[in-house]
Amino acid sequence: MKIHQRHPWPLTVEEAIAIQNQLQPEVITEDQLGEVQYVAGVDVGFENDYAISRAAVAVLSFPDLQLVEQAIARRPTTFPYVPGFLSFREVPVVIDALEQVSTIPDLILCDGQGIAHPRRFGLACHLGVLTNMPTIGVAKSLLIGKHEELPVEKGSWQPLRYKGGIVGAVLRSRTGVRPLYVSPGHRISLDTAIDYTLRCITKYRLPETTRWADKLASNRI
DNA sequence: GCGACAG
DNA sequence: ATCTTGTCGC
């Protein structure tokens, strides 16, 4: 698939904030996705002491979750890790990898936040707006917001609140494990995001999509 | 001003 | 994120 460049990649936090504020209004948190036949997971790893970023895309069939295509891309790392600006470090190389894929996914699960972000524009939102594809943010830890304690049973969840609004959900993907932080990225509602996240989980804490992308991005296959 | 802080 | 085998705990 081809992805058109909407903006040059910034090198400073100041420029990054401007881009976040400019693109945020384009985020859609209502369901705008068709029948899901393919789900993709994306993740980024590093080489040479972080000098090189390596992205992996794993496309799985849905709902059977079988790997049907994969892609790897590498490019020099140009942005440091700064909480709140992860997309500027990871999205460029993720797009490189997505451009190599011929099986266009109907939904992408990202390793990071969606609108559960200080400016409601996390990695999943950024990737979604630039590709115009439905995306979900599925993070392993909390960036912003607060929530009530949640039951230990698989499937239970609690709203994640931030500045008076609900920006995501804290979701128990498996009984007794640490929760996942799910938030809409683009073209999907929170309820639907929770539903698809659970439908991508089999016997582990993380969705099969991100497990595959993780494995591919970290060399050790 | 003091902490918190996706990967 | 990354370096890494066995091991503690349910």
Image (cartoon, coloured by chain):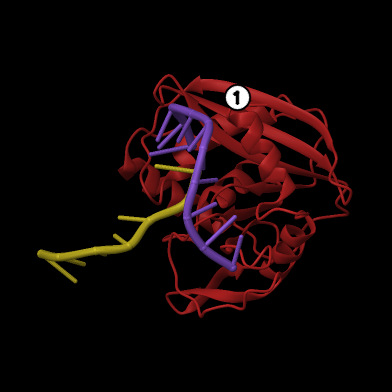
Chain colours: A red, B yellow, C purple
- Local SS, label 1: loop
Hey, which quadrant is residue A140 in on the image? Answer: bottom right
Q: Where is residue A194 shown, x and y percent of the image?
A: 70, 65
Residue found at x 64% / y 34%:
A215
On screen, residue A2 above or below A132: above
Residue found at x 44% / y 70%:
A145
Which quarter of the rendered picture does the N terminus of chain A lie within?
A: top right
Residue type at mark 1?
Answer: Asn
Residue found at x 47% / y 61%:
A142
Hey, which quadrant is residue A217 in on the image? Answer: top right
On screen, residue A35 above or below A48: below
Residue tagged by mark 1?
A219
Q: Is residue A13 left or right of residue A195?
A: left
Q: Is residue A157 left or right of residue A118?
A: right
Which quarter of the rendered picture does the C terminus of chain A lie within?
A: top right
User: Could you tell me which chain the residue with mark 1 belongs to?
Assistant: A
Q: Nearer the viewer, residue A150 or B5?
A: A150
Q: Where is residue A90 shown, x and y percent of the image?
A: 51, 36
The answer, for residue A3, to whether it is visible in the render is: no
